[in-house]
Image (cartoon, rainbow, N blue to C red):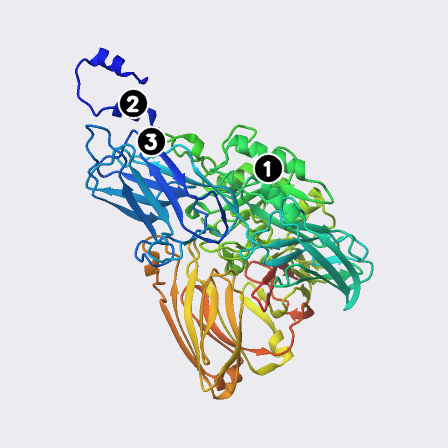
Amino acid sequence: MKKMTDSELKAKLGHYTAPEGLYATAKDRPFLGTVTCNVDTIVAGSWQEIILDYELGASGMADGSWFKATFRFYSDWALFQTGDPRGADYISAEYQAGPLVPGQSPATVQSLKIRFDQKGHERPFQKAVIVDTVDGYLKAGDHIIVRLGDRRHGGPGTRVQTFVEQNFRIRCYVDPLGTSRAATVPGDTVLQIVPGPPAQVVVSASRAVRAGEALPLRIRTEDAWGNTCWEQPERVVVQATLDGAPIYEKQAQLAAGGWALLLVDDLPTQKPGELAITAHLPDHPRVPPKTFYVAVEKAFHAPRMYYCDLHVHSEDTIGTNSTTYNLTYGRDVSGLDILAFSHNDFNITKDKWDRTVELIHGITKDGEFVAFPGTEWCGSSCAGGDHNVVFLHDGIPEFPYLATGEHVRSFEWNEEMGATAQVQPGAWPLEELWAAYAKDPDGHLLIPHVGGRRCILDWHYPTLERLIEIGSSWGHFGWLYQEAMERGYKLGASMAGDEHRGRCGGGVPGTAVFGTKGGISGVLAPALTRVEVAKALRARHTFATTGERTVGLVRCGEHIQGDEFRHKGPARIDYRFLGDAGWDEVMAYDHTGMIWHRDLQAELGYSPRRVRLRWGGARVKDRYRSADWKGLVTVRGGVINAFVARGFEHREETCWRESGTQIGFQSGTYGDADAIEMDISGLENTTITVSCSIDGYVKVGDPLKGNPFMHCPTVSWEVSGRELIEESRLRKDLPGVEMFVALERMSEAVLPRDVSGHFEIAAENGPHGFRPVYLLARQIDDAKVWTSALFIEFA
């Protein structure tokens, strides 16, 4: 009702009793109250105390009601806890009564209780800090003060999310009547999460280029969490050698506005050899230089190797930052050649989809950058699981409706539908998605993948499904490619970002569920055009990398990876891998498993002192798959002279010296592996003991109590140095998905960046009438490359 004056009230009501002036005050207040915050800009990954002050509106809060502060599920903000006031990430809520007017009774609430629930609200605002009222009501003008990272007891605060975000939103809700029906408090709390100072230099380019062709190379600075720095125009010195001889030097400045990056487009590529390009910041001596290696080839199949990320999200569904931001980040920062969006089909609105298609058509320029529109069909695993749809043709994509008017989303469910909307299936189950696009196979590419709703390979349609995503920021899934080969599916290998954090193109890992670097794929196309790239993708002329600009090539005679062909007699398989950290091992697989192995450590000769402990794998194949390891390696009878970590993804994964004979460690693995390399004296007389606990992601419950892996909560393993010397590699397999611990000898020599060779396989077909052969190479830092398989039908 319209606010009335005192005289109007008296005219309508006559004599009445009410707190003096409270009516006018209540009518002037926002009905559901307001929320204010003590900060508006914070550095990604920093430690903070965030104070949310909710001033109750005219609605007040009834006995048994609650207040809720929510943010998006993809955020890797550290998990909040309520059990240790002196610990990190402690949250609290307190009540502060507002003023009373004459004749007004105070509120009766006795206390507040606070809890954290990672699925306490609807996607995308799933993560929720919930404050319950206890024994009484609250009145208008009272305050509920929530502290995220309460420091008043001596704790460090809370570690905020590790990646930058424009307009990070905390959306608050109140249940004013105690009915558990939430109402949105108007006006989101909006924070700007920005990068910190430069901590590392990143160089990206093609790993292989034809002699005489242009080599665009991008240099950028990142903060300690891998966020590209912003508006920090640092001086950078770029130097290059060819086979060790200096050939190039220049000094330049990173961009003064926007991302701190530099495009270098004048590198000399006339002569074949190994080009080593080093960038360093002369004004930041503590930031280490970065060297990028390029193989300049006299004869190469294309002007250069092309790299793509076919699985990118933006804030239009459940990603970070705008579609424009993500497109330009992929092109200008990551230096991708090819990109495809994959908006969650149930979540994207028609208007936002049309805008994405318009942006993609506008940014695509043959010879420079190719982008494709795409969606992620989000059917549950029981209906086939997640499959990306990439629209390769240059027409108007038939989404969310076919030209005939049929609905081809898995279903529709987004914030704009309203509270009364019902979930109605569109193309469901997977067969209906296939049927929607089967009429134009050359214009479409379907990619099953593992993410939240992992694909189930009980379903397969070879006409549309030509690639399979075997890794992303969710983890490494080599087991999925092997399962496809065992089933006789002719699928090529790909990896992608599945990037929800605005860092496509091999984006750096954060914490929480996206715990590995986003993957990318190499594409063997003769030219960087929409038509040629589309043909190469459907031909499976690809390799999958764990985010690095590495290369994996395999051929049999005139046939390359992805080809299916007939062959008579034993087959010679030729391979080549180009990397940066040094190749540790190369393996070949067919439908039966590993059929050939090359150990580069052994070839170079084992050291009598160097040993590494490796551990890895995942607990489960589904969404919350991480294995969180915390342990101790103890050496008796010898001394650990030095040690170094390998494969650790971020600052919260670490190892430390406990004593001269003990190293502690903690890390999470998502199908990948981490390692500690050690220099141990008197190895032959030692006993090495590994003891650790294995937890999982704490989706429900108190994060301080952990989430022990029920099938293997602890590991204890003891081996003798003499046994390790004799066997060279010892491995203990554990329950879970490819989970293991291993002790392995190492060489003193520098591992090669460029590895090639050949081997021969017998003329034997598998049970499906052909023999698939693919290669996997692993670097010393656990970076991996899978080639697409050769599909050989032996005559």
Is 758 or 613 nearer to us in this picture?
A: 613
Question: Residue 504: horizontal and vertical position, in percent?
Answer: 58, 49
Residue 22's label in the rendered image is: none
The nearer-to-camera label among 2 and 1 is 2
Q: For numbered disc 2, what is the local secondary structure? A: helix
Is 319 or 426 nearer to us in this picture?
A: 319
Identified by mark 1, the residue type is: Lys
Instruction: Estimate the spatial distance between the alpha carbons at disc 1 and disc 3, rounded to whole Å.
Output: 53 Å
Which residue matches tag 3? 32
Q: Are marks 3 and 2 in contact (CB under 8 Å)?
A: no
Question: Residue 96: horizontal and vertical position, in percent?
Answer: 28, 41
Mark 2 Cα-neighbour bin, 10 Å: few <14, some 14–19, many ≥20: few
Which residue matches tag 2? 24
Question: Which quadrant of the view contains residue 747?
Answer: bottom right
Relative side of 677 to 121, left or right: right
Question: Residue 702: horizontal and vertical position, in percent?
Answer: 32, 55
